Image (cartoon, rainbow, N blue to C red):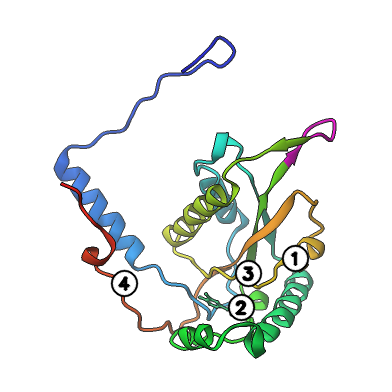
Amino acid sequence: MQNEEHIHKPYHQVQYEQDEMLRRSEEYFQLMNERRSVRDFSDREVPIEVINNIIKTASTAPSGAHKQPWTFCVISNKELKHHLRELAEEEERKNYAGRMSDRWLKDLEKIGTDAIKEFIDIAPWIIVVMKKTFDYGENGQKINNYYVNESVGIACGFLISAIHHAGLVTLTHTPSPMNFISKALNRPDNEKPYLLLPIGHALETATVPDLERKPLEQIAIYYG
Ligand code: IYR
């Protein structure tokens, strides 16, 4: 649908023959299947240009009414990282010491997490993804956003795949509650913290839990 005010432009799809399509889909699966959430970070530097490209990739995600309701807070300052770590650990200590149910703690045993979040200090970059529940217009009026959780979740997926594609590692950290981040990063009241991701290189000695992914039969249903 289009009217004179909102002109559409031609779209040219990049298309492949079936065998090439199959090869590309297989190759991309193989790449993404190597992705792991990593907790053992090295402090090896990563150029800001790489981080910027990763963020630009995340912002290609579809969003409700193309509002792109996200802000990526990029942090490398050591003092600020340490401040965030201390605040995150304060909440996580309470989570592990009673706010999380026994069943939840049991489910996490195989992952081996605890309240210590050293990676926030060590990883060269922290990105905090903020969701914009609404926007402010030029005259300070509130402007609606739509499907904010879905939109920001999809953008985070793009972000994580771009990080992996660049040969870096990350971790989806959700210190809970996350309100402390808004104050620490001095963000306006229309933004709420969504996800914290340390980004960098894995330590040579890094380990990850020996987990398996569900096979296709368990995750897909086909309707002939
Ligand atoms: N936010 C806590 C606990 C935690 C929860 C889930 I669900 C995980 O998959 C991993 C951890 C933490 O970051 O330790």
Select label 2 or label 3 by which is in front: 2
The magenta span reads: 135-141
Residue 89, quarter of picture: bottom right
Circles 1 and 3, Cβ within 8 Å, touching? The answer is no
Report the Cα–Cα distance between label 3 and label 4.
29 Å
Mark 2, residue position: 119
Q: Amino acid at mark 1?
A: Asn
Residue 187, quarter of picture: bottom right
Mark 1, residue position: 179
| First in sequence: mark 4 vs mark 2 | 2
Task: Name the outermost residue toward the top.
Answer: 4
Mark 3, residue position: 124
Q: Amino acid at mark 2?
A: Phe
Mark 4, residue position: 213
Secondary structure mostly taken by the magenta-highlighted segment of the chain? loop
Which residue is more in the foreground, 147 or 44?
Answer: 147
Residue 65 at x, y percent in the picture: 56, 34
